[in-house]
Amino acid sequence: MMDAAAVAASAALPWLAGALGVLAIRRGDADRGWLHAIGYGYLLGLLAATLVLRAVSASGARWSLPIVIVAMVALIGIAYALARPLPSPIGAWKDAMARTRALPKPMNAVFWGCVALIAVRFAGLALEVAWRPLQPWDAWSQWGTKSRVWFEFGTMLPFVSPGEWLAAGDPRAFIDMHSAYPGTVPLVQVYASLWLGRFDESLMNVAWPVVALTLGAAFYAQARRAGIGIPKAMVFTYALLSLPFLDIHVALAGVADLFVASAYGLAAMSLWQWTRTRQHSDLALAVLFAAACPALKLEGTFWALTLLPGLVVALHRRVGLGLVVLLAASAFGYLLFGPDHVSVFGYALRTQFTNVSQPLAEHLFVMDNWHLLWYAAIAAIALSYRTLFARDVAPMTVTMLGALAFVAVVFYYSSAAGGVADESLVNRLPLHMTPALVFYVLMLLQFSPSRSASPYDEAARSAPA
Amino acid sequence: MIAASAAAPDRKQSPLFVAALAFVAALATTAFVVAVRASGGLTLSAPPSITIPGARLELVRGSGRRAGDATIIDALTSEGVAIVSLRLTPTSADAYPRIAWNLQTPDHRHLALTLVWGTREQPGRTFAKPIEWVGDGPIGVAPTAEEGWRGSITGVGLAVRGRLTAPLRVGGVTLAGRSITTSLREIATEWLTFYPFRGITITLPFDEERTQALPLVPAIALAIALATIAHALVRRRRKLPLDARFIWALVLVGWLAVDLRWQANLAWQLGLTAQRFAGKTQEEKNLALDDRDLYVLVGDVRAVLPPPPARVLFLADNYSLRTRGSYFFYPHNVYHDLARDLARAPKPEELHPGDYVVLFLYTLLAYDRAGKALVWSDGARKPVEELLFRENGPLVLRVQ
């Protein structure tokens, strides 16, 4: 019982701080809504909690739960002060229920059916996380190692290279499989452990199901803001949360990929909303979550960079598309004339092509890792080929092209090709872009020229999320 | 042009109902076509399958024993091979296109399997086909006529190569008769395969699907495509535009079909997880792990160490063992060789006074017990104090 309360409190405080923070950022927006704040708020608040831990560690003090609680309550207070006056959550709830009730019966059934499927899925995943100790190799060889040490000693002790470890003889400098990896995800585990009062390999991963669930809430809210009808927005939210590879990264919690997927997806959706609304708050959220990507995993830097071309296209379509062509030409030139080997963030970039198409195709189209997502993506792109670079869609298309180019370079032209060929990496990188991709597919179908408007979509256009 | 309409027709006319029917019909057609192809024609009844218990197999290479109905292979030959075989009354290759071996071993990572067989038509020749080993349970292989599976089969065998780290139990072999019904049953069985959470799940959750005759996801994608084409043809004949609601419903039904299987898989897995870990403390969970023996062993070593953070060098030849074992040492300050191939032993000058060295199944350093020293292959020595010594177990030393 105490554990359940600790886990709930550990999730609630950053969630509230983050949600209020999002409402503060969106102060003055006409379509400011609670669901959007709830969806974006948890990860934002959790990242703030890790910054609190970093600050305490940098001050030389030892972490303790009272310090964390005081800091989080202070953040909640500041965010509340900045966000006032708040929209009424009860009013928002009543309004959402009224809109759902107004749907025709079959659409209502589709909506609630999807909600039920998501609820069942996440109840099971939460129990799986609560019971299962760290299982994935990376979880206990490079993430859980840091959280174990840092929690034990109440501060961020350094992790160094094996050479430094052997040479220095320092009892307080540690190593693990990837000492240089960012500390944010281990700090998330430390934060939960502080609430639990012990290092618990299962319960310390409470953030994983909550991050996935709030990603779903953010996705639904953004779809509604984009004018998607209630049933369609919920069907796509269910589609995203039902993806087996995403579910597995929740169930077998402890690795950072779900966090990168979530941060990148939230950033991309906000950026794309900004191209439509030009609200500063959307751009601010896009920048915040893009900046979080490198703090979660080294390749997060590249993911954040893939958002830039879309931004430029949104500012000036011709310049942006010209930039994309220039980047593509540069990449092609590098392949023709570049050095054989360049080292970037631990990956060796090569000009030599490694064909990993077969394992890639098997994982995307044959095995059930992604259900029907990649088939649907191809179908949506084919249906929308005439509008891919239209004004509203071009920033999204260019962002996704950047993401696909990044995946293609890593897979076909880097040292990671080995990881694709032996299939240890083949799904992880696609996972990072999956929430953004699902949103892109939804938007393509929304803007498809072969689609005539549905009354449910039109009714939703001005609805706050 | 795709039309969308909000009109509410009666239930039998509803797009969801029609789409569900169309989807089921298209999926059944897809499976039927694949089954016909796999069975080599419209063969409705199959000859009875031939199942041979492992105890009737002959171990012609390697060493082993009989245990109940099975043959156990305990060791390979010095060339690293073992072969079990079986003579058959000449049997039509066409009628029995698939062979399934029932094999069990705790560790198959270093083993390669090959199906071998002979035919009456080419008596002096032995044919062979590698078998991909994925997951547990019967391991199937379907050699083609081009590979030599034709005419009358006079014997089959299984060649095992590599490194046998644990006994391999050969429970038996089945030659499955071929017909549309057996092929359909096989497809259905594959679609209902349970994928438990294993060590590889975080990267390869559905590894077995790549060897299936008709994996579920492409089957459903194909069924959706077929149903859409059929819908388009019907609408075109009636000079009507495509009904967007039908296509949406079709995709939704297909997605639900594949996701309900996944949900069932998750529910099943949750039951297993609960059985194994629910209500247990961290310590009890560690003792319920597959590598509990390693956890216990590290626990014994930790008992002779001072409170954390002691500097511990955990040295073992096996990459997985030293990486996983190291995790159990935290929050001690543990070092292990990160290279997959054991690169080198730490040099004498890299061992500092007060460091703890744990040697476990390690070949790059020796311990001179009488001289109380660690010994390198070049003769270099480092004085140590012995804290724990077990024959064939861990050796714990403190550097002086």
Image: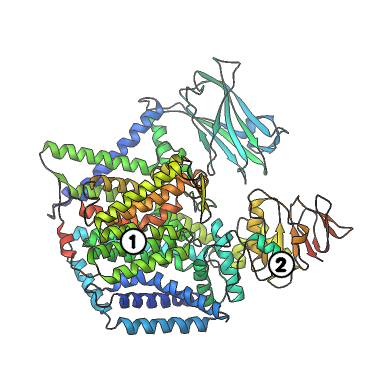
Q: Is A35 or B346 nearer to us in this picture?
A: B346
Looking at the image, is mark 2 or mark 1 earlier in the sequence? 2
Residue lying furthest front: A337
Horizontal side of B286 relative to A440 (left or right) equals right
- In the image, what residue occupies the spot 62% across and 28% down? B85
Q: Amino acid at mark 2?
A: Gly
Instruction: Give the quadrant of residue A212.
Output: bottom left
Q: How many marks?
A: 2
Does label 1 lie on the same chain as label 2?
yes
Q: Residues within 10 Å of mark 1 (few under 14, many from 20)?
A: many
- Residue annotated with mark 1: A268
The chain holding disc 2 is A
Q: Position of residue B17 (x, y in %)?
A: 22, 48
Q: Is the residue A332 above or below the residue A111 in the image?
A: above
Q: Is B295 or B138 nearer to us in this picture?
A: B295
Horizontal side of A195 relative to A158 (left or right) equals left
Q: Secondary structure at mark 1?
A: helix
- Residue annotated with mark 2: A169
Q: Residues within 10 Å of mark 2 (few under 14, many from 20)?
A: some
Horizontal side of A437 relative to B390 (left or right) equals left
Q: Amino acid at mark 1?
A: Ala
Q: Can residue B222 be spotted in the picture?
A: yes
- In the image, what residue occupies the spot 80% across and 58% down? B390
The chain holding disc 1 is A
Q: Position of residue B310 (x, y in %)?
A: 71, 69
- In the image, what residue occupies the spot 43% across and 57% down? A302
Residue lying furthest left: B239
Q: Position of residue B344 (x, y in %)?
A: 71, 51
Contact flag, marks 2 and 1 (Cβ < 8 Å): no
Q: Can residue B280 be spotted in the picture?
A: no
Q: Position of residue B82 (x, y in %)?
A: 67, 32
Q: Which mark is residue A180?
A: none
